Amino acid sequence: MKNKAPVSKNEELTATIEDLTYQGMGVAKVDGYPLFVAGALPGEQVKLHVLKADKKYGFAKAIDYLTTSPDRVAPGKKELVQTGIAPLQHWTYAAQLKYKRKLVTDLLQKSHLSNLEVAPTVGMENPSGYRNKAQVPARDFKGQLTTGFFRRGSHNFVPLEDYFIQDPRIDEVILVVRDILREFKVPAYNEEKHTGVIRNVMVRRGHYSGEVMVVLVTKTKKLMGAAEISAQIQEKCSDVVSVIQNINSEKTNVILGKTSKVLRGRNYIQDQLNGLTFNISAQSFYQVNPVQTEKLYARAVELADLTGTETVVDAYCGIGTISLSLAQAAKQVYGVEIVPEAIADAKENARLNNLKNLTFETGNAEDALAKWVSDGIQPDVIMVDPPRKGLTENFIEAAVKAAPQKVVYVSCNPATLVRDIERFGEQGYSVIGALEPFDQFPQTTHVETIAVLEKAAD
Ligand code: SAH
């Protein structure tokens, strides 16, 4: 096949970086042909060495910076870029926030929604050490079980101790766990041979409660010394209230397996969000940035504009975090979520907070919504907070049938948000006010966005 690229491998050229990819790579354009440049920032003029030139795009290395961005900050740790943990750490936080707003705006421009406004991104005061959860792989490195991360898009293991965006206490606990596993000579998982024991160490910490959960994800059912290992973890870390073994014997990139057993303490940690208390078990989804989540939820509930008489559906409800906030202001809330453990947590959480106007169901959001509607439930507001792939056409169809006044859409992927806004548009629902980006993931290119859709008057 003829290579139509305007540049060729090993060529050197000078170009200006125009944009950033979702991976945080600089993008230079040569006659419209994109060249991806690791570490380069928008606005920078760079001397490039072409590493690879495919038909539609290529990769180049920055060999000299002729100009540097005024928003560039000290590079920090290169491992954090290579692993994709903090690909934007070399950019000022203000520039990151502007970029996230632009990401949403650009997607709207590319669709038929260029008339919509995007508010400035709501950021953090302190955009590091924010993550309340870590899931780090354990591998054999120089003959020892070591915790770290994979180089992005590869299986190359990079040992790490400071993850920069994780709660610093979580980083400490990981090292204590690593050392105990070393002492007990527990073999790390070997991906190629599918042998060994410890695949991942997951740690969660309650932002307000300080309670810590440690999950040892093992390839094997048997974990030799489990009782002593878990006892030592608790002895050395008095804030650990739960040690769990999760078994994942599959050849997969999915971190958690289906079975978990409690080695010590409880099977959950507790935390607070906006004054509500939540039990969180190992398998349940829980927002990773508690400081920003409080702002996000408060705003989502405010936008739902409840007076106390409304019926509300919270689809993709997880452990009921948004549902409970809604229940404080609505007549009745129906929540649906596909993970049974999360629904068990949600029910318990309603009870813990003494809220009685909630109904939770395990299931597929689109089926549950359709069923509720056919049972005669008429939601005034539907709140959705789907995973990255967004809503299905069936869900949108069921939502339109339910005919709520408002749909409040909390999205972790602006591309599917824009797609779904267009689909709702075809069904007579349009966006009211501006889209509001929230920075749930500082130092990364991820952005969370809230949009409110309303039914046009008949
Ligand atoms: N609103 C919650 C959870 C949001 S994450 C919170 O903020 O904590 C999205 C949730 O959707 C996850 O808990 C995931 O398990 C769930 N989910 C994924 N696919 C689903 C589906 N088809 N139906 C219902 N829930 C689903």
Image: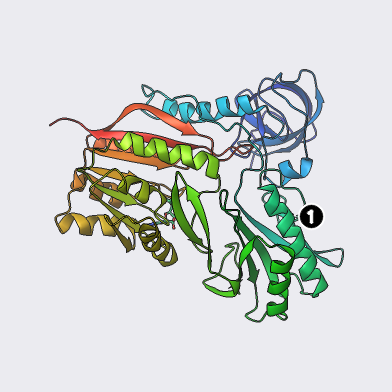
Q: Is residue 252 left or right of residue 62?
A: left
Q: State the SS at label 1.
A: strand
Quadrant the N terminus occupies = top right
- Residue 126, by quadrant, is top right
Is residue 82 visible to us here?
yes
Front-lying residue, 242 or 411: 242
Ligand 1 shown in quarter = bottom left
Total marks shown come to: 1
Amino acid type shown at disc 1: Pro
Front-lying residue, 71 or 330: 330
Q: Residue 332, how many percent across, how many down?
A: 24, 51
Compared with residue 216, is residue 126 higher up or lower down, i.e. above or below? above
Q: How is the image coloured?
A: rainbow
Compared with residue 366, is residue 264 higher up or lower down, i.e. above or below? below
Q: Residue 355, how many percent across, how many down?
A: 32, 55
Q: Residue at x 31, y 62 (%)?
A: 361
Front-lying residue, 212 or 89: 212
Quadrant the C terminus occupies = top left
Q: Label 1: which residue? A: 159
Q: Residue 39, how many percent across, how many down?
A: 73, 33
Is residue 193 visible to us here?
no
- Residue 188, by quadrant, is bottom right
Q: Is residue 330 left or right of residue 6?
A: left
Q: Residue at x 73, y 43 (%)?
A: 80
Q: Residues within 10 Å of mark 1 (few under 14, many from 20)?
A: some
**Mark 1 Cβ inside 8 Å of ligand 1:** no
Q: Residue at x 44, y 66 (%)?
A: 341
Q: Residue at x 67, y 45 (%)?
A: 85
Q: Residue 223, how many percent across, how many down?
A: 68, 79
